[in-house]
Image (cartoon, rainbow, N blue to C red):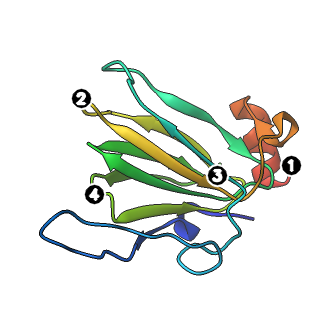
Amino acid sequence: MSSVFNCSVMELPRIQSPSGNLTPVYGNTQVPFDIARIYYLYDIPGGETRGGHAHRNLQQLIVAASGSFDVLLDDGVNRKVVHLNRPYFGLYMPNMIWRELINFSSGGICLVLASEVYDESDYLREYQEFKQLARGI
């Protein structure tokens, strides 16, 4: 069973230069999975929440590529909030963790590296169903 305590903020490599910084990310090196999909969320209106689901199998690394936001993590028993505000830190999330992305700053961009291609059947969109599966009920 996954736990919010298995979620961790990872520092990503940073190549600094007077002309700007670069952060390379490699699957199975900086993140503990092969990267099968990359997507990003942007132009999020103030007060909006994104996420509101869990994944049966998918693992993710979530990065605040610009601005900041909070990630509410829930394993069906425990909850915690992680604040992301630097493009060289990523939040690793194993499967079976409910997540909500909240408190986006103006211009916030959420970059997501995912272990699987999109598969609607991998999503758990009803919290009560997630909770029952997470608890093994």
Give the residue type at disc 3: Ile
Q: Residue at position x 73%, y 29% from top?
A: 126
Q: Which residue is mark 4?
A: 86
Q: Residue at position x 83%, y 40% from top?
A: 119
Q: Which residue is mark 2?
A: 106
Q: Which residue is mark 1?
A: 137
Q: Residue at position x 16%, y 64% from top?
A: 19
Label 1 environment density (alpha carbons within 10 Å; few <14, some 14–19, many ≥20): few
Q: Position of residue 57 (x, y in %)?
A: 80, 55
Side of 58 where 79 appears, left or right: left
SS for tag 1? loop
Cα–Cα span, label 4 and label 2: 15 Å
Q: Residue at position x 33%, y 67% from top?
A: 22
Q: Position of residue 117 (x, y in %)?
A: 78, 48
Side of 38 where 42 appears, left or right: left
Label pair 3/4, CB-CB below 8 angstroms: no
